[in-house]
Image (tube, rainbow, N blue to C red):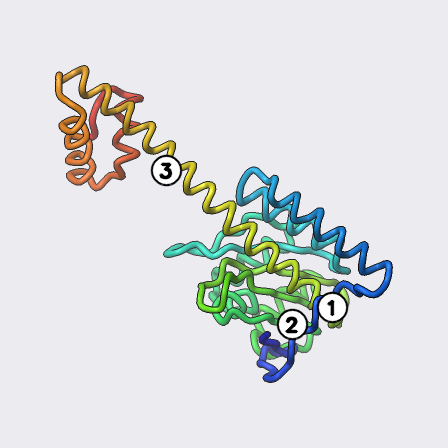
Amino acid sequence: MDHTDQRGAPIDGAPPRPLTAAYGANDANGAVQADVFSQLAVEMQAAAGVEETVDAVVQFALQALDCSYAGVALHAKGERPAIPAVTDAVVAEIYQFQLDSNEGPLIASMRDRATVLICDTAADQRWPQWAEKVTTLGVRSVLDVPLTLGQASSTVGVLGLYSQRPDGFSTDDEAIAQILARHASVAVAAARHEETMAAAVDARKLVGQAMGILMERFDVDGDRAFAILRRYSQDTNTKLRDVAQQLIHTRQLPH
């Protein structure tokens, strides 16, 4: 597990804490922690989509960790990271500042797949503009934890935790945040997969309806109808799904 000090510099050789240390598994509190994480897993599994999943994560973070605010930023391939869930507008402002400037602990955590701990934003020197911004907003310590799947995969996103106190996050807090991030990574990946599959099914339905319209209007078979849709898609540089949707709604093919 990669660690960073308050300036974001890596601390090599720091071993990950065992889960028993994070949960306190040898006492009653450990049983409570384990039960709470089990409930979170059920909630994330039952979530209707990606946004609902990450909202469950940030709400849980406020309960499980002694933090003032929490948020999740998700990596979007070929696009700017999305900000689907925050517990306060302060987090959205902090995230947006980093996305606009392309620097800060969020960017570093997502890029390097490493946990970044800022013990005191008033003393941080690595990202001075960011530090000044968040200190002005009343945030004094930050813990950014990457959401990853496997050693070779890209970062799914980042879980950001914020405290109004310096040194707001203990070693146990970091260990719990790491566990939460692992839960969240799997849940977000599953929710994204389900949304992708649902979109694919929806697209097939639309294309099928559009093909039916063409078959009836021009008395052609299914292969010919699909070829017409594909040609219009290529000629107009429009997704096949969008061509089909336009035909269904307007009864006209794109020009």
The residue lying at 15 percent from left, 22 percent from top is 221
Q: Which mark is residue 47?
A: none
The residue lying at 59 percent from left, 45 percent from top is 53
Q: Residues within 10 Å of mark 1 (few under 14, many from 20)?
A: many
Q: Position of residue 249 (x, y in %)?
A: 31, 21
Of the residues shown, which amino acid type is indicated by label 1?
Answer: Phe
Of the residues shown, which amino acid type is indicated by label 2?
Answer: Leu
Say whether disc 1 or disc 3 marks the residue closer to the N-terminus: 1
Residue 120 vs residue 51: left or right? right
- Quarter of the image with the C terminus in it: top left
Of the residues shown, which amino acid type is indicated by label 3?
Answer: Ala
Q: CA distance from mark 2 to mark 3?
A: 40 Å
Observer-nearest of 169 and 127: 169
Identify the residue position indicated by label 3 in the image. Answer: 200
Q: Which mark is residue 117?
A: 2
Identify the residue position indicated by label 1 in the image. Answer: 169
